[in-house]
Image (tube, rainbow, N blue to C red):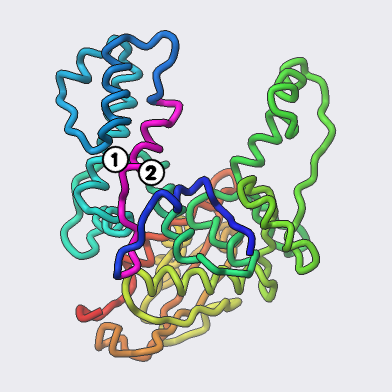
Amino acid sequence: MPDFWISSGYYLLKRTADNQLAVTDDYLRAYFNRPEVVPVEESCDNERALHAALMEEPRRVVKPAELLRMEDEDARENYEIVLNFRDHLLRHGTIEAAYAALFKLDGPVEPVRLAPIFLDQMVHVILRGLLEGCEDPFRLRAAELLFRSQKVTIQDGNIMLADEEVIDLYASTGGFGDLGRLIVEAQTPLRQIDLDVMTEENAHQYWERAERFDMVLDMTFGRPGLDALCRVLETWIAHFTGAEVRVAPVQSISDDRWSWHVGLDSVSTNILNDLYEGQEVSEERLADILSLFRLEFRDTNAMLPQLAGRPIYLGLAKGENELLRMKPQNLLVNLPLAETV
């Protein structure tokens, strides 16, 4: 079976006995090889020395004085950001534990400020591990929603999601890299490039394009993309909480006993909160809802006793600029889990 998401760094990590991803020296070195911290021609000797030392011993303690000796303030700040992330990883040992610690799983919330890109990268590599052996390209494409923002297009009731970064790239270069950027700067129209919508017929192309994130996912009700996302959410929840759940798309919430809901992003959270509280929600806001889901626990003992047997409703919505920014952590901190799970 073809590989996928090599850029996640999955192969630089080691699996633990309990199926977690343990941080390794090589994984840390990959961060010190990022362009933000790799020395450039203008780098001072102190910066070069520190970089060499970290490549040799990526877990070494870096004293504040070492950073202060750097001449370039931007380089110093970049090192502080990466070292802060490295230290957080080392405190917890595995990617999952480091991620969970940010959202009060298995303990209090840690007062750690990490760049958003690091959160996405943790989700990326965790999902790469969880989807090892997956043969369904729709599931892999749907999983991208958890760590890459999506541009939403709705045409004739069909909900299409395209990678925001890819869309921005085509908007600025037409897909032609630096040449395209020069053409744009010269105000010359670019040839329109259409992205491929993933279908049963072309889904096999995902394997050779997985690192490009350039296939459009059809999230219309009843289509494979929506079902694939449900399977990903089930896997994500089980890995972090141990609870086995069933997730299925629904077209509306018609439940007089609606007891609990979880928004999968900030927009749907606000809309569902207002609906639950009986507040009037405008048609314009309701139109932002892309998908609704019904989540059920296979073992009701895994739920809070007062909610045992009741369905949990999930929502997914687009926000400003027609963007979907999913927050997978919401599924880990907002589900009504019993304390024993």
* Magenta stretch in the rendered image: 18-36
Q: Quadrant of residue 339?
A: bottom left
Give the answer, above or below, for where 258 lies relative to 132. Answer: below
Residue 298 picture quarter:
bottom left
The answer to whether residue 292 is above or below residue 300 is above
Tell which residue pokes out farthest to the front in this image.
56
Residue 109 in picture, x, y percent from top left: 20, 55
Dot 1 crowding, Cα within 10 Å, few <14, some 14–19, many 20+: many
Q: Residue at x 60, y 44 (%)?
A: 164
Which image quadrant for residue 107? Answer: bottom left
> In the rendering, at what x and y percent does residue 118 appear?
38, 43
Residue occupying image coordinates x 22% and y 53%: 92
Residue 224 image position (x, y, % from top left): 67, 72
Q: Which mark is residue 118?
A: 2
Q: Residue at x 25, y 79 (%)?
A: 341
Q: Are marks 1 and 2 in contact (CB under 8 Å)?
A: yes
Residue toward you, 335 or 1? 1
What kind of residue is marked 2?
Phe
Tag 1, which secondary structure? helix
Per the rendering, the mark at residue 85 is: 1
Which is more N-terminal, label 2 or label 1? 1
Residue 35 counted in the magenta span: yes
Name the residue type under label 1: Phe
Residue at 19 percent of width and 19 percent of height: 66
User: Marks 1 and 2, how far apart in space?
Assistant: 8 Å
Left or right, residue 180 beside residue 237: right
Q: Nearer the viewer, residue 286 or 2?
A: 2
Coordinates of residue 196 in the picture (x, y in percent): 77, 53
Q: Callout 2: 10 Å neighbours few (<14), some, many (20+)?
A: some
